[in-house]
Image (cartoon, helix red, strand yellow):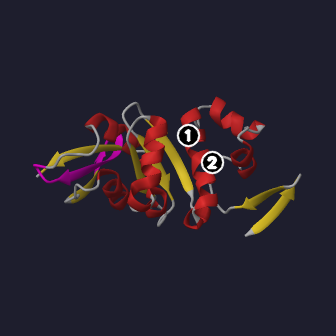
Amino acid sequence: MILYIYSDTLYKNYNMKSPICEICLKSGLLCTACQNKVTNGELTDSDVSILTLLYKECSKNGDLDSIGIKKLISSKDVELIVCSKGDGKKIVGKGGYLAKKIQDILKKPVRIVEESSNPREFLQNIILPVPIINLNIIYSPKGEKYKIVIPRNSRLPLKLDVFNRLAKELLGKEVEIGFE
């Protein structure tokens, strides 16, 4: 860990990886590059609030200093935070403390999902605790899409249309759900 001293203020250099640069996270003001991400729609104001909160929590919780935030996806019903593999537990926090804090700021549920190159694992992380029985790739003239099969009496933690939109944004392919 590197320490910087600016005008009698001590700043720690955390290794948190996020779509916003560390200077903006420290200062609370966005540089031109980060402001362009907000203007272009890559990030929202609520995304900036979440990233700033997580950065501030780094100073209180040493486990958070090396987390990686890959993507934030908002819908009116839920906020999805995609983090690096192994960082999900750190972001949720002990007893769900940090996740609850984020929910209080956004006034909507938050799902924290670990990134995976395996589509089955990634989709499983989104719909936990519902198990995926099967994942198929369907080829059609319109292109490829995934079809997941879940138990018949399962209740998804997200609305079906919200899940489909989030899954398409994350995987770049349509996702269809079937029941067995």
Of badges 1 and 2, the one in the foreground is 1
Residue drawn 44% across the image and 50% down it:
99
Indicate the quadrant where residue 93 lies: bottom left
Measuring from the top left, give residue 101's x and y in whole percent. 47, 46
Q: Amino acid at mark 1?
A: Asp
Measuring from the top left, give residue 23's x and y in whole percent. 75, 49
Residue drawn 26% across the image and 43% down it:
176
Up the image or down, 18 lies above or below 3; here it is above
Q: Which residue is mark 1?
A: 47
Left or right of 152 in this view: 26: right
Left or right of 82 in this view: 140: left
Question: Could you tell me if the residues under marks 1 and 2 are in contact, i.e. CB atoms within 8 Å?
Answer: yes
Other-residue count near label 1 (Cα within 10 Å), few / some / many at <14 / 14–19 / ≥20: many
- CA–CA distance in space, label 1 to label 2: 9 Å
- Near-viewer residue (174 or 81): 81
Q: Amino acid at mark 2?
A: Pro
Measuring from the top left, give residue 161's x and y in whole percent. 30, 34
Q: Mostly what secondary structure, the magenta segment?
A: strand
Q: Which residue is mark 2?
A: 19
Which tag, 1 or 2, sits closer to the chain's start?
Answer: 2
Q: Is residue 165 magenta?
A: no
Up the image or down, 136 lies above or below 156; here it is below
Which segment is the magenta one? 138-153
